[in-house]
Structure formats: C-alpha cells, structure tokens
Amino acid sequence: MSLAAEAPRAGKLKHWTVYFVLWCRMAFGLHAFISGLNYFVPLFALSGGPGPSPIGEFQSAMTDIGMYGLIKAIEMVVGAFLLANRLVPLMALIEMPITIAIAYLCFVVDRSPNIMFSGAREVFFNSVLLAAYADYFLPLFAWRARYSPIWDRKAGGGGGA
C-alpha cells in the first residue's frame, strides 16, 4: 500500500508524517535521478563554491577509473525506483554508502556553505527514508539471529521468518 493511501487510516497525528515522507522520497528520488542523469546527459552546469573545490581532484580520479560513472548510474536507478515507489527500503539502503561519501566530502573536505547544504540534504533525505521504513531493517539487529536460509523456504509460501 502506498504512503498516500495509508494517510487517511493513519490518524490526525500521523497524517502529516505520511506526506512528509512522501515529499522526502520524491525530492530525494528526483535529486538522485537528475544528478545521475546529468553525468551522462549534461542538463545543468555543476555548481560549486568560489574557486576550485578540493573535491574536484577526488572526482577526477574516480572518473579516470570508471567509478564515478558507476556511482551516477546507481544514483539514476535509485532515483527512478524512489520516484516509482518501488523497493524503497532497498533503494535507501543502496544509496547510503553514496550518502556517507557525499557527506564526508561536503563536511570534511570542501566545507563551503553551498556544498555543506548538499551534504546535509543528502543525509537528511536518506535518514528520513531509512527511519520511515525501519521495520524492514530492525530484524538485522537481532543479537542472536536465527538461521533461516532462503533455500529452506517452502515453495509458493512467500517465505517469512
């Protein structure tokens, strides 16, 4: 069931949070999709602070080995899935290493105000999505996890723990 469909059932207190998460998902998805697409099809000039950013050298090195293109392709896929409201918890999880790298580059390496805003936005949107879909991740923190291989599940039963 979609977040918007859940809103009427959520009650007055939770009602605004459903739309807040929807907005964050759409904004994060659109940003990721456009950011990834912009690498392959230049749509917008990349903005930066005054003077060359210290991130540029790192970005150039990643481009030289082909890693930057891979990251941008992942961002584009994640963005498309977030916009389509498909596999949202998985997409937020896949995007998290990229979010951490962006945050580090923004807060530690560059530290110019507009770049720091980009890092904060990235961390905020991804954190909101991970928190909104926390029920999918909380079982991962089981102190003594139960052995449950996928090959032991009954056919057609849909699995389950």
Image: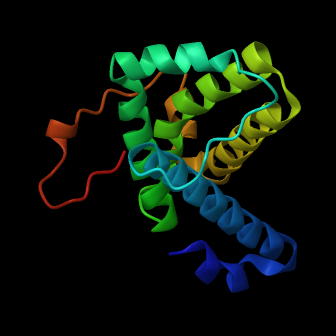
Q: Between 120 and 157, which is closer to the camera in this rendering?
A: 120
Residue plotted at (21% across, 59% down): 157
Q: Between 29 and 39, which is closer to the camera in this rendering?
A: 39
Q: Is residue 59 left or right of residue 132?
A: left
Which part of the image, by quadrant, shows the C terminus? top left
User: Is residue 105 placed above or below 25 in the rendered structure?
Assistant: above
Q: Between 146 and 75, which is closer to the camera in this rendering?
A: 75
Residue plotted at (57% across, 60% down): 30
User: Is residue 97 placed above or below 109 in the rendered structure?
Assistant: below
Residue 52: x %, y % from top left: 71, 21
Q: Which residue occupies the extreme front position in the image?
A: 51
Residue plotted at (60% across, 23% down): 101
Residue 122: x %, y % from top left: 69, 41
User: Is residue 45 placed above or below 104 in the rendered structure?
Assistant: below
Q: Is residue 131 left or right of residue 51?
A: left
User: Is residue 39 placed above or below 17 in the rendered structure?
Assistant: above
Residue 121: x %, y % from top left: 75, 44
